[in-house]
Image (tube, rainbow, N blue to C red):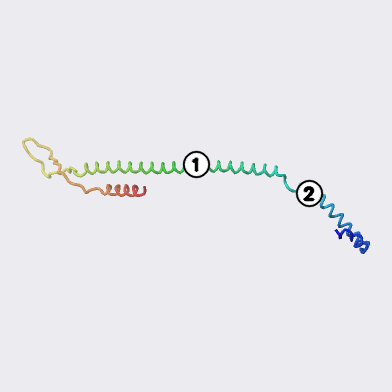
Amino acid sequence: MSFFKEIPQILSEFSKTQKLMALILLLFTIIIITISPSIISTITLDRKDLENKIENKQGEVDNLKILLEELDSTIRTNQKNCTNEIVKRENEFLLMLKEIKREAINNEKANNLVLEKFQYNEPILDSVVFLPQVPQVPRVEKKSTVIPKIEECEKKIKAQK
């Protein structure tokens, strides 16, 4: 408190320029102290504005989470459908191969014994002239290589599953 008693003595030792500078500095400080809260409040946002922005952003985040879940579900469904179609197509190939194999086996059985016509050089003569007889001689054909190839394809398709 003794400081306030000595203020007039300290001020009397200042020159007019120093007193004027001190007065301007004091006035400038008072103005800053008075005006700064209003300037700060205009620059910064109100708490309610910030809360509204936070709520809006939270709503956007929630909407994006829902969209993400929907897209994830769609992707999983499409992957499942694609996988099911691939399996379905593989099964169709296997059925086609089995059908081809069955036909090849049936053809092989039918073609194993082939009757060849054998012709005599001289006609058989009797009281009536006959045309030469053409006897049929069975001949075994070579076994087909198609069936082993089909079985190999089946094994490859089954191994990829």
Q: Quadrant of the N terminus?
A: bottom right
Q: Tag 2, which secondary structure?
A: helix
Q: Nearer the viewer, residue 43 or 79?
A: 43
User: Residue 145: x and y, percent?
Assistant: 26, 49
* Displayed quadrant of residue 12: bottom right
Residue beneath disc 2: 37
Instruction: Answer left or right for 29 relative to 132.
Output: right
Q: Tag 1, which secondary structure?
A: helix
**Residue type at mark 1?**
Ser
**Residue type at mark 2?**
Pro
| Circle nearer the viewer, 2 or 1 | 2
N-terminal of the two: label 2 or label 1? 2
Seen in the picture, residue 94 relative to 28 is either above or below; the reply is: above
Seen in the picture, residue 4 relative to 105 is either above or below; the reply is: below
Residue 143 is labelled as none
Residue beneath disc 1: 73
Q: Nearer the viewer, residue 149 or 41?
A: 41
In contact (CB < 8 Å): disc 2 and disc 1: no
> Residue at the spot x=22%, y=48% of the render?
143
User: Residue 75: x and y, percent?
Assistant: 49, 43
* Displayed quadrant of residue 88: top left
Q: Residue furthest left?
A: 127
Query: What is the C-alpha distance between the residues marked 2 and 1?
Result: 53 Å
